[in-house]
Image: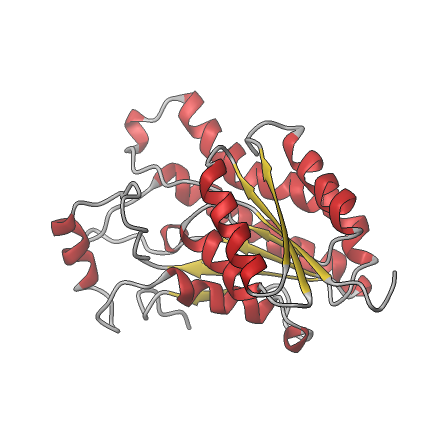
């Protein structure tokens, strides 16, 4: 690997929201980013344009990560276009608030495949490349729903199971990849403000009620989460691995 090659990042679910913010925050003259989305081509192009405007290189890739072959294809796309891979950010996913008694087998499988299965397959495909990479990092985007189980808050059974499984895999991979210098961490967003016009899991009244439960008194912003991801992906985070960094305004306080 050339020491002069730009760092290469793959960010999934990056057409809007947290994923797009991560790309914008990582962007710079020393960064090339593959912007992935399942189907929002226009959003991915807008994100890629923002990366280029900040001096970086960017390409887009489409594909449903719940489909088994997509992860390896997207990783290969990054390598073919940019010559390697140094940062994997597994962000793609969705929230499902369906009560457990009403969940079908298909709906549960969809959540697990789109979140946990996608992370598993992305990491497996990326590992050989990251081992040869520059300041190699894996960052998974989890969620407070895997940690906050209270009667005064909504519960997301399928999403919680998928995100908790993802965090467990983060810890296992951190041990497995430590000898090679690849760090593996998760960020755990709390309630994050949606992009204008984007689908929201809560009505405005429900969002206001949830905000009242956040110690810092406001919804998080995609940029708040992106800053945490960018730190964990940076050379400065070389001695941090196997951790879950909560970005939630104090919603979940852990001992």
Give the vertical position of 119 relative to 171 (above or below): above
In the rendered view, does 209 fall on the left or right side of 99?
left
In the rendered view, does 166 fall on the left or right side of 8?
left
Q: Quadrant of residue 124?
A: top right
Residue in the picture at 66% in, 63% down: 31
Residue in the picture at 27% in, 44% down: 197
Give the vertical position of 55 relative to 146 (above or below): below
The residue lying toward the viewer, choosing from 155 and 42, is 42
Q: Quadrant of residue 240?
A: bottom right
Which residue is farthest right? 1
Q: Position of residue 42 (x, y in %)?
A: 46, 39
Colour mapping = secondary structure
Q: Position of residue 47 (x, y in %)?
A: 50, 51
Q: Position of residue 138 (x, y in %)?
A: 64, 57
Q: Quadrant of the N terminus?
A: bottom right
Is residue 13 visible in the rendered image? The answer is no
Residue in the picture at 29% in, 25% down: 102
Which residue is farthest bottom? 236
Q: Quadrant of the C terminus?
A: bottom left
Q: Quadrant of residue 191?
A: bottom left
In the rendered view, does 237 fall on the left or right side of 146?
right
Q: Position of residue 216 (x, y in %)?
A: 26, 73
Residue in the picture at 68% in, 54% down: 173
Is residue 27 visible in the rendered image? The answer is yes
Q: How many marks overall?
A: 0
The residue lying toward the viewer, choosing from 236 and 250, is 236
Give the vertical position of 194 relative to 110 (above or below): below
Which residue is farthest left? 205
């Amino acid at each position: 690997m050339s020491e002069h090659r730009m760092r290469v990042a793959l960010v999934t679910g990056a057409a809007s929201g947290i994923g797009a913010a991560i790309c914008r925050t990582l962007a710079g003259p020393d960064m090339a980013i593959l912007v992935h989305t399942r189907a929002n081509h226009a959003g991915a192009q807008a994100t890629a344009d923002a990366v280029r405007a900040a001096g970086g290189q960017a390409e887009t890739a489409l594909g449903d990560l719940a489909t088994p072959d997509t992860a390896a294809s997207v990783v290969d796309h990054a390598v073919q276009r940019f010559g390697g891979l140094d940062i994997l950010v597994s962000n793609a996913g969705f929230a499902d608030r369906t009560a457990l008694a009403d969940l079908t087998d298909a709906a549960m499988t969809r959540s697990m495949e789109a979140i946990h299965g996608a992370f598993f397959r992305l990491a497996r495909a990326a590992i050989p490349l990251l081992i040869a990479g520059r300041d190699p990092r894996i960052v998974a985007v989890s969620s407070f729903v895997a940690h906050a189980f209270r009667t005064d808050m909504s519960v997301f059974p399928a999403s919680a199971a998928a995100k908790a499984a993802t965090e467990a895999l983060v810890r296992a991979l951190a041990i497995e990849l430590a000898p090679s210098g690849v760090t593996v961490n998760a960020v755990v967003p709390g309630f994050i403000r949606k992009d204008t016009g984007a689908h929201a899991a809560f009505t405005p009244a429900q969002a206001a009620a949830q905000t009242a439960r956040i110690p810092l008194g406001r919804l998080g912003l995609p940029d708040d989460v992106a800053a945490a991801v960018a730190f964990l992906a940076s050379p400065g985070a070389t001695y941090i691995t196997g951790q879950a960094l909560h970005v939630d305004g104090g919603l979940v306080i852990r001992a």
